[in-house]
Amino acid sequence: MINYSFSTMLMTFLASNLIIVLITMCFHHEKILLSIGYKVIAVFLILTLLRILFPFEMPFSENIYLPKLLSLVVGIIRHPFIELEGIGISIWTGLEVVWGIGFLVNLYRYEKDCRIIRQFHHRYGIDVTREEPYCSILAEVCGERKNDFRIMRVPALNSPMLTGIRKPCIMIPIEEELSREELYYTFRHETFHHYHREILVKFGVGLLGMVYWWNPACKKLKEQLEQILEMRIDENVAEHDKRRAVGYMASMINIMEVLWARKQIALDSGLSLSDEESTKMQQRFRMLCGRREKVHVPLFLTLLAVMVVIYLGSYMVILEADYEPAGVVIQNTMPTTEEFYAISNEDGIYTIFCGDVLIEYTDTLDYYPSDILVYNN
């Protein structure tokens, strides 16, 4: 049976954070990153995403019970202190409400930011899609691929960027004139983001951050995934050609120096050419120059084994509170000699009692003794 519970959320949090710590260590040591390749790191990030997206207990999972003190803490958190029309209200219920409110607030902020940016573009942006040299350079970059891009010159940009999923738009700063070479590499970079559907990836990670807004690991995951996306595009633009790589990096540096010097307002609604800190830009350049290095097989296998063990282990083993009667002492009046019994309600939810004390509402009896008495309501 596939179950979702407080315990599965706990394992998800522990496993995802362990993987993210390892990924962070790889990013802070460029020799490791160069040795195993950023594509391998991308696989590790996918494992993290999968673990966060599927915080469930599987049929093959084994429960390991927490010590009595930790079990008592979990019991207090999940104990329904108030009952409203058959619904138990616990500390965990309150946390779930706060969680839901946080998600709605973050979703509202995201929609509001997108609306403000759309209005800003509509009011102040200038469409230069059919003007030269933009039209001919974009046609050269797209080649035989579908070319449905718009090009907008917009004020207050700190970097060229791409917005839109169905109607992609490449935005370039209105204050500075970019050279033909800079426009070529800018369009090549941004169109590759669109062809690889990376705005969808960024939106998915952003949505994940809205759902798990309380988890600092998601913020770090978003930053690292965006860095990997940029590295991937760098390699596609350069095409393993030294001359092209040098021209590409020179164009990025020129754009970065001109636009960052003005310290314009950043618009975080799409994918941009140089929206990382300078240290991350340096890391991208070193990765681009070091892309021909062979993967260090022993290091790769070791890291892969560790990641897989963490990922699969978090499903195979679930840390569960010990709900035996002797360990549940939420109220001093609770009889320690009484056995648990359950009342089966029409909606499939069980009301669990120990003596006269209400323990919890649950949809499964997997964590209770197999011979627990069950009464029909």
Image (tube, rainbow, N blue to C red):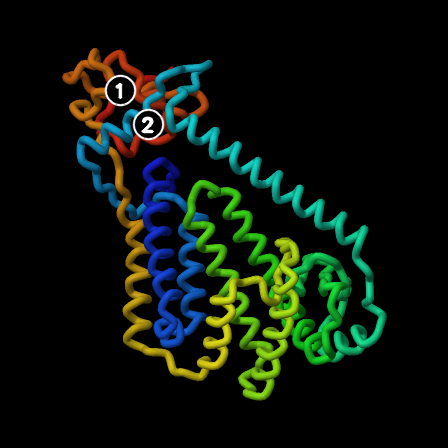
From this view, report whether residue 278 is shown above or below residue 324.
Answer: below
* Residue 361: x %, y % from top left: 37, 24
**In which quadrant of the rendered view does residue 83 lie?**
top left
Q: On the image, numbered disc 2 is attached to which residue?
A: 77
Q: Which SS class for mark 2? A: helix
The amino acid on which the numbered mark 1 sits, given as a three-letter code, is: Tyr
Q: Residue at x 41, y 58 (%)?
A: 47
Q: Which mark is residue 209?
A: none
Q: What is the crowding at mark 1: few (fewer than 14 residues within 10 Å), some, or many (at least 20)?
A: some
Q: Residue at x 72, y 73 (%)?
A: 178
Q: What is the crowding at mark 2: few (fewer than 14 residues within 10 Å), some, or many (at least 20)?
A: some
* Residue 285: x %, y % from top left: 50, 75
Q: Residue at x 51, y 69 (%)?
A: 281
In this orientation, does residue 148 appear? yes
Q: How many angstroms separate mark 2 from mark 1 (CA)? A: 21 Å
Which mark sits nearer the N-terminus, 2 or 1?
A: 2
Q: Which SS class for mark 1? A: strand
Q: Which mark is residue 341?
A: 1
Specify whether 134 is left or right of 280. Answer: right
The quarter in which the N terminus is drawn is: top left
**In which quadrant of the rendered view does residue 154 lie?**
bottom right
Q: Residue furthest front?
A: 261
The amino acid on which the numbered mark 2 sits, given as a three-letter code, is: Ile
Residue closer to the observer: 237 or 185: 185
Q: Residue at x 56, y 74 (%)?
A: 234
Specify whether 322 is left or right of 193. Answer: left
Specify whether 322 is left or right of 114. Answer: left
